[in-house]
Image (cartoon, helix red, strand yellow):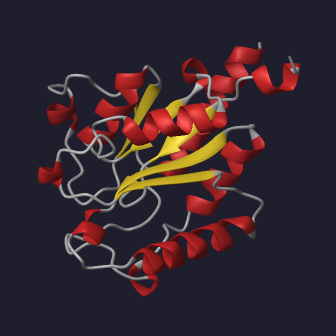
Amino acid sequence: MDHQNTMKTKAVFLDRDGTLNADSVHYIKSADEFHLFNYTADALRILTRLGYMNILITNQSALGRNMITVKEIENIHLRLKTAIRRVGAEIHGIYYCPHLPDDNCECRKPKIGNLEKAIRDFNIDIGKSFFIGDSFKDIQTGAAVGCRTIFVRTGIDSSSIKTLKKWNPRPDFIAENLLEAAQLIECIERNRDL
């Protein structure tokens, strides 16, 4: 058996809208509506440098609502990858659910179908991995597979600390934004090496 193929890797699973880019109550329907936060590339560069696989796990029901095409979603993700590559950051995988909430599919967060697929595809060590997102669904999804979770307060419905304390499961960490979350992971890594 090739030892390299059995080596597990660590990952940061990332929500997209509200975590990497400004969200919209009307959905992100085109590359022109897709606006990365100004710190996203720097945050992803930190995670890339630390050796994490950066993997998007995102619900995109605008596709199921016929508000956007697969081609336009691909354009959005190309724009994302191009913008972050300029600073040496990578997105290693993108998994999106096109279904409506009522479709009861296995890939729509908080269900873990896409997350399980990414874990298999990239041979992820879940114990060394994180899930970062701006909603309770993201925290539920990460917790369901046993990775540490970080809630970022950049979504359109950013919950108050009082509300977060009522969540079950609660996030392992709370950060103001993705950059602060990446710096937190960097700090955890540094302490692990001591």
Residue 114 appears in the rendering: yes
Q: Quadrant of residue 79?
A: bottom right
Residue at (50%, 38%) from the top-left corner?
117
Q: Nearer the viewer, residue 24 or 81?
A: 81
Q: Which residue, as the protein is rendered here, is positioned at the far bottom? A: 32
Relative to 48, is 36 above or below? below
Q: Quadrant of residue 17?
A: bottom left
Q: Is residue 89 left or right of residue 164?
A: right
Q: Which residue, as the protein is rendered here, is positioned at the far top? A: 194
Q: Position of residue 172 (x, y in %)?
A: 39, 24
Residue at (30%, 70%) from the top-left corner?
63
Q: Is residue 171 left or right of residue 71?
A: left
Q: Is residue 76 left or right of residue 106?
A: right
Q: Nearer the viewer, residue 188 or 56?
A: 56
Q: In what quadrant of the picture does the C terminus appear?
A: top right
Residue at (32%, 79%) from the top-left corner?
68
Q: Is residue 51 left or right of residue 14?
A: right
Q: Position of residue 8 (x, y in %)?
A: 71, 23
- Counting every numbered tag in the picture gives 0
Residue at (77%, 16%) from the top-left corner?
193
Relative to 32, is 140 above or below? above
Q: Nearer the viewer, residue 173 or 48?
A: 48
Q: Position of residue 127 (x, y in %)?
A: 56, 18
Q: Position of residue 80 (x, y in %)?
A: 57, 69
Residue 184 appears in the rendering: no
Relative to 10, is 92 above or below? below
Q: In what quadrant of the picture does the N terminus appear?
A: top right
